[in-house]
Image: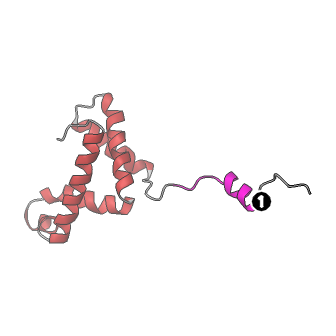
Amino acid sequence: MKRSHLLPLSTLLAALAAPAAHANDFPTSSRVEYVLECMQKHGSKGEYLYKCSCVIDHIAKAMTHDEYLEMSTSLRNQTIAGERGAVFRDPPPVKEMAGKYKTIQANANKACYVPQR
């Protein structure tokens, strides 16, 4: 009795299918915006193109893009003075989000050799 060495069609199709996009993939514009801002904080030195790209890649592995937008906005807007900024400074859930983002970002900076600023 001859045995077929052919793979079942479903296995073959699965192997040929394009790999799925990473679930937490960020849009290019968000990645570029982060890298440019990060580079600017570090004197626009060319080496930070790679280091800051590494940081946003680490951040993207730790959260979804929606979480990134929410958390980074919470942290960024805590410096707004007066009543308008109170929305980002005072509520405990917002403080928690900002703190979580700071921790993720600090770990990513450390992993990519980017000094905190």
Residue at 26% across, 60% down = 71
Q: Is residue 43 magenta?
A: no
Q: Is residue 1 left or right of residue 64?
A: right
The residue furthest front is 1
Check disc 1 and report its element: helix, strand or loop.
Answer: loop
Q: Which residue is mark 1?
A: 8
Residue at 33% across, 62% down = 67
Give percent across and percent down for residue 114: 25, 37
Residue at 19% across, 67% down = 94
Q: Is residue 95 left or right of residue 38?
A: left
Residue at 20% across, 57% down = 75
Q: Is residue 18 magenta?
A: yes
Give percent across and percent down for residue 107: 25, 47
Name the quadrant containing residue 80: bottom left
**Which of the image's four quarters has the N terminus?**
bottom right
Q: Which residues are magenta?
A: 9-21
Give percent across and percent down for residue 13: 72, 57
Q: Amino acid at mark 1?
A: Pro
Q: Is residue 111 left or right of residue 20?
A: left
Give percent across and percent down for residue 81: 9, 60
